[in-house]
Amino acid sequence: MRKEAEIQDKKRRIKLAASMLCADQGSLNGQIKEIESAGADMLHIDIMDGRFVPNMTGGSDYASDIRSVSSIVCDYHFMVEKPDEQIAMLKGLRSGDRICFHAECGCDCLKVIDQIHRMGAEAGLAINPGTPAAAIKKFLNETDYILLLIVNPGFKGQPVIPRTLHKLSELRKTLDEMGKDAEEILIDGAVTFDNILEIVRLGADNLVCGPYTCFNKELGGIEPTLNRVKEVLRKEGYDVERRGR
Amino acid sequence: MKKILFSPSICTGGYGEVKETISWLESKGADHIHIDIMDGRYVHPIMGGVDYVNMIRENTSLPIELHFMTCGTERFLEMYDIRENEIIYIHPDSTYHPHRLLQTIRGKKAKAGIVISVDDEPEDFVELYEESEFILLMGVTPGCPGSEFQESVFEKIRKVREICREQGIKRHVEIDGSVSPGNIEKLIEAGFDSVVLGYPGCFDPVNGREKTMNTMIRLAQ
């Protein structure tokens, strides 16, 4: 169990996932190299079907192309109506890769979690701002991580919905009570330099870094921005060093 | 001078270096850029996101073809905010109101096109030819790259031309699917105005894109 003292000691390991949605779609290979050399832990790949969310992205071919050129963990976030079908089309998964889908999509969550595990990946459940933490409690023994959206999904650069941060601390507490200290919470949407410390203090382990905390032109682009994020977290005592792949 | 227009399917060129792929296609004299948009429902895969399409729009001066393989295509047209002069292909069975959808597309000063898929017959859409400036014949089943080339397209283009004659109209007819050095000459002979080039006709993983494209250009002259 994650001890209160440990949280207060802030020795926790925080992992950074660069959002490929915010990368330059015209030169992804170069962007991925830069993200990797800046020491990000994961590439966060959004897959949207234009129906579960009002936006469309690339699908399994796109995700698999990213997988094939990257040496770090890929974290796939399926915002689709039929995650089982789309997940089955992913190619070239590597050990440590993670796949999450939405609890709201109406599918048989346990079945899809099992499908992901059988593919050798870690399985996560994602929830929208309107979904209470209690809705996924019954799945927490099967999941490896939870993705909490702090904005309504579909587009980049939206403001954080404050109530979702309350949900974050609630979820952290639930996981602690269940003794699930290895289960990570990934925060997705508008993580900024203004809210990053609050978010990790409330119990986030992983952060999706987008326009503010990764692809920030004002700060000089990917590498200087990610370095600044790490510096901010390190200064507060958090562990931000990437290990292995 | 080629006897047929080339419209490479950019999605088959990979996603890692799309800007470089566009410049290469332009340097090889591509005439259009064909972009597949799939929603995971009309066809199984998901492909061709909004940001991806916008990036291509920003990086090329070539005319763009958007091929919507989507259910309820009206909503997707809005999502992609179609532009003047873009060629917009729709599958008539993807909506209850294909005629109105074609009118909507033309109302935005884009060029409207219908797709005659593998299981469709040219006669199925006789009421739509008037509103369609472009007609796309599928040579393979949409969403299934590498599936077998349908020889029936040769009979279908003959039928399309006949319907156009009867209606007193002229239409641009294009073919999509498994166009290759093996069939390009026959397709030119059959009277297609343009060809969509995918893996076998452009981004051939075995022979490489340069060699494949050069062969295609030579055969099309």
Image (cartoon, coloured by chain):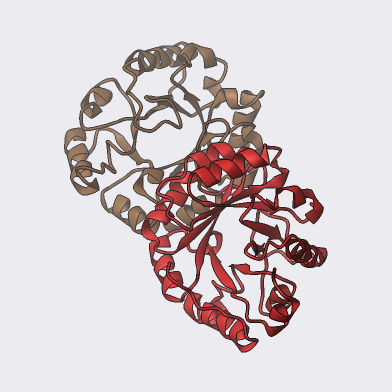
Whether residue A119 is situated above or below residue A134 in the rendered picture: above
Residue at 45%, 53% in the rendered image: B56
Colour that chain A carries in the picture: red
Whether residue B38 is situated above or below residue A181 in the rendered picture: above
B54 or B157, which lies in front? B54
Whether residue B199 is situated above or below residue A24 in the rendered picture: above
Numbered-mark total: 0
A6 or B56, which lies in front? A6
Evaluate whether residue A23 shows in this view.
yes
* Side (left or right) of B20 relative to B85: left
B29 or A181, which lies in front? A181
Whether residue A212 is situated above or below residue A234 in the rendered picture: above
Q: Position of residue B6 (x, y in %)?
A: 32, 38
When asked about the image quadrant of residue A168, the answer is bottom right
The quadrant the N terminus of chain B occupies is: top left
Q: Position of residue A126 (x, y in %)?
A: 67, 53
Query: Which chain did the renderer colour brown?
Result: B
Evaluate whether residue A81 shows in this view.
no
Residue at 71%, 78% in the rendered image: A7
Q: Position of residue B166 (x, y in %)?
A: 46, 10
A95 or A70, which lies in front? A95
The quadrant the C terminus of chain B occupies is: top left
* Side (left or right) of A24 relative to A154: left
Q: Position of residue A2 (x, y in %)?
A: 69, 71
